[in-house]
Amino acid sequence: MMRTNLFPAILLAGPPHCGKSVLAFLLTQRLRELGVAHYLLRAAPDGEGDWFLAGKSDLVRTLRLQHKTGYSPQFVDHMRAAIESRLLPLLVDVGGRPQGEQLGILKACTHSILLYRTDDELRQWQELIAGMDLLPIAELRSNLDGDEKVETSHPVLRGSISGLERERQKVGETFGALLDRVAGICRYDASILEQEHLRHAPFPAVNERELALKLDVPSTGAGAKWEPGHLARIGSLVPAAEPCAIYGRGPVWLAAALAVRALPAPCALFDARYGWITVPEVTFRKRGGNIKVQISLMAMDCVTTMNKNGCWLEVKLPGGILEPEKVLMPTVMVGTEGIAISGKLPRWLFAALARKFAPERNWIGIDDPKLAQVIIVHSNNPSLRPGNVLLRPGTP
């Protein structure tokens, strides 16, 4: 077993609306460019993620409100356990007003970065995390439009930071100093971590990084830039109907396509919170379940003019989380029309739902809010193939 307690878990803390989520997004993007293996854990049930910072503003704000939930004991336990059993260095983005049992998420971390706007906020947060045995990395005043300034570098980085706005992200001197410090704390040999993870794969591994190289997928410092059209070419490299273990951090629609391709054989995915997860079965129940769904017909102009009828399946997680287990969902309408799956869901759940509907539906699509498109990952219709895209309902 890996000694996961050796990995840092860096808390990004501070009051609401001070730029924590934007800072987390900027840090994780730059760390990827530097090749620093890590995982950004969004430990607040506010519906945000990388797609919120990178997608179209009007669309992602609507999705955020649709999937926003409150803290629950189950959510807190889930996040605390994910931090304690981490398999990679973590950045932990918490909500603005943790209290009571929610403080367990903070206590599970090892280091802290504190953002604030006023001296009172600084004192309040210093008092809040006092006694949690967190090693302070930085305490920074967040200015929306002000100048950046590093006041002291050691032992704690102090000063002011700006540009932490969703619409006008920018980096400067203070961010650069913070990035250097975080990268130094999180730097482990990425190839060794990958080898260790793959060594425990339960089935023959499909390494998304290697797959991207074979397909000549364009790459930036942050990783492969997967595009829907690449799905049309994976068939020549990934055998069908054979067990596979999917390893990587590509888009959710890539994982869903690979998981469906393995049918009827089993499939597993690597999750930084749990390790290897065998994609569970999805079972219909007449009443209740551990996920909520809402299904509606898609407008014809959203399914293109090729008479490919489709349904929109919106999936929500009660409490904002779902442990990897058998998925119980309310029975949806019976039919053969295509189905587009949408929601703030983990990769393994997109894969499980796609595998559930693939044998009986005309096509399976995965909603990508960042692209404002539905990506076809499986089709029983010869005129609609994996990698084709459909417009999201309401997209001009």
Image (tube, grey):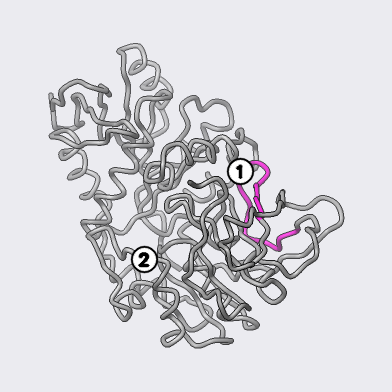
- Closest to the camera, between mark 1 and mark 2, is 2
Q: Earlier in the sequence, mark 1 or mark 2?
A: 2
Q: Amino acid at mark 2?
A: Trp
Q: Amino acid at mark 1?
A: Gly
Residue at image location 13% in from the left, 34% down from the top = 173
Q: Residues within 10 Å of mark 2 (few under 14, many from 20)?
A: some
Asked if residue 294 lies in the magenta stretch, the reply is no
Q: In the drawing, does residue 52 fall left or right of residue 266? A: left
Residue 265: image location, x then y, percent: 62, 83
Q: Which residue is mark 2?
A: 226
Label 1, label 2: how far apart the Cα atoms are: 27 Å
Q: Which disc is residue 144 wearing?
A: none
Residue 346: image location, x then y, percent: 54, 56
Residue 378: image location, x then y, percent: 57, 74
Q: In the drawing, does residue 83 fall left or right of residue 154? A: right
Observer-nearest residue: 15 or 123?
A: 15
Q: SS class of the residue under badge 1?
A: helix
As drawn, the residue found furthest toward the front would be: 305
Q: SS class of the residue under badge 2?
A: loop
Q: Residues within 10 Å of mark 1 (few under 14, many from 20)?
A: many
Query: Which region shows up in magenta?
Result: 312-328
Residue at image location 27% in from the left, 36% down from the top = 169
Q: Which residue is mark 1?
A: 320
Residue at image location 31% in from the left, 18% down from the top = 117
Residue at image location 27% in from the left, 58% down from the top = 222
Q: In the drawing, does residue 178 fall left or right of residue 290? A: left
Q: In the drawing, does residue 148 fall left or right of residue 230? A: left
Q: Is residue 288 above or below residue 158?
A: below
Q: Is residue 371 above or below residue 135?
A: below
Q: Is residue 110 above or below residue 295?
A: above
Asked if residue 322 lies in the magenta stretch, the reply is yes
